[in-house]
Image (spheres, rainbow, N blue to C red):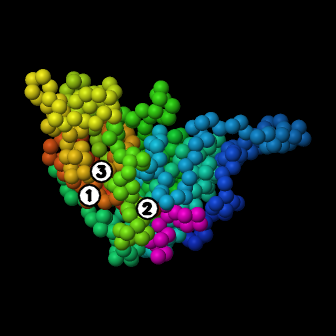
Amino acid sequence: MSTTRSTRKTGPDTAPDPAPDAAPDTGTSAGAPRHPVSRRRLLGAAGAAGAAGLVAGGASGAVAAEALRDAPPAPLTSIGANGVPFHGPHQAGITTPLQAAGHFAAFDLAPGAGRKEAAALMRRWSAAARELSEGRAAAGATGSALDAGPAALTVTFGFGRTFFDRTGLAARRPAGLAPLPPFSADALDERRSDGDLWLQIGADDALVAFDALRTLQRRAGAAAVLRWQMSGFNRTPGATDRPRTARNLMGQVDGTNNPKPEDPDFDAHVFVAPDSGQAWLAGGSYAVFRRIRMLLDTWDHLSPERQERVIGRRKSDGAPLSGGGETTPVDMNKQLADGSLAIAGDAHVRVAAPESNGGATMLRRSFSYHDGYLDTRDGPVPDAGLLFVAWQADPLKGFVPVQRKLDRGDGLSRFLRHEASGLFAVPGGAAEGEYVGQRLLEG
């Protein structure tokens, strides 16, 4: 579901704004190792112990509650036990394997809020994200994830173009945040686009992901107001016989040709170099976010063979129509017996390929979405598609040239509608004792 700009209200669902320069007291230092049993699970056990005492009553209830508190909880299962470090040279959630549940949200700084308030907000948000990624309960948590471990939770923060104006840092706005050019296929809703601050949240458990979203929204306090929010999903880890490339809602294998961290030029394509002239952005990246609705009813009327021609790959296994398996390089020159190209001239894999775009490369890390149905003249149609995220060291050399080519000649574009857009500068990861964006806001 997507949410447009809202006005902050006070009430039981809104946490008070913490002291601007004080992170919540978690009882552990930023560098403390994660305990085998999450604090969230311990709090859940304590709640169960209290309930047991009330039911049993008297001394026997107290003894039972104490015994339950002393008993170690059962070990977490594999999905719940997975954790992703918050600190590091890059923010988590960029090269992290795709999680099952995702949320995206953009906030605008509140009227009157500036650099000082933004720094305090990023300090609070970073502290909460670190605690939640370690499986600990953060201040303002909803309680929906009390029984869970970290479940590969990641929170990634980015700054939009307008953030630099509102904080008095326009002179330090990177050139890569130049506005994206218009594309002919765009049908963008400004209420669901852009924003001062951007959050990407992912986890392998939907309740853990939701708890993180609500916690961070509540921890925004009076410093920022929600502009828009969207939720997505992917296949749950372990749902297939072996790790496989994800499929989108069109049923197509999506992401085969993504660059891989082990590629020698991966960092150059995805992360901002230390000599970029923006020290605060070194090790960071640029995220292009697009809400792309798929015209699924129209697409589903195509035969499987026609769908494969539009994409340039077999639907069954993702292998290119030029032959081989999924990871076989696409042979753009391969001809069929009748002399026609195996990969059609407007096939998506041909038009989007780096060799068709001067070597332009992006790391695509997207989530599917379904927000019910839209009423049309022809009846209800799915409001569903892709929450597309592309990571690159420079959007002017990554997303922009590729989207221009797709806009002009991609056969798949007839079945897509770009409905929201955003471009965000994503700082490098925070070191121990730092918060995300500190080198920009305090530099």
Q: Earlier in the sequence, mark 1 or mark 3?
A: 3
Left or right side of 39 for 436 = left
Q: Residue at x 66, y 54 (%)?
A: 33
- Count up the numbered dots: 3
- Dot 3 corresponds to which residue? 361
Q: Residue at x 49, y 60 (%)?
A: 89
Q: Position of residue 261 (x, y in %)?
A: 42, 48
Amino acid at pointer 1: Lys
Q: Which range is magenta?
A: 429-443
Is residue 188 in sight in this rendering?
no
Task: Quote the CA–CA distance across marks 2 and 1.
Answer: 17 Å
Q: Position of residue 284 (x, y in %)?
A: 42, 61
Label placed on residue 397: 1
Residue 366 occupies quadrant: top left
Under tag 1, what secondary structure? loop
Amino acid at pointer 3: Thr
Task: Quote the CA–CA distance across marks 1 and 3.
Answer: 8 Å
- The secondary structure making up most of the magenta span is loop
Contact flag, marks 2 and 3 (Cβ < 8 Å): no
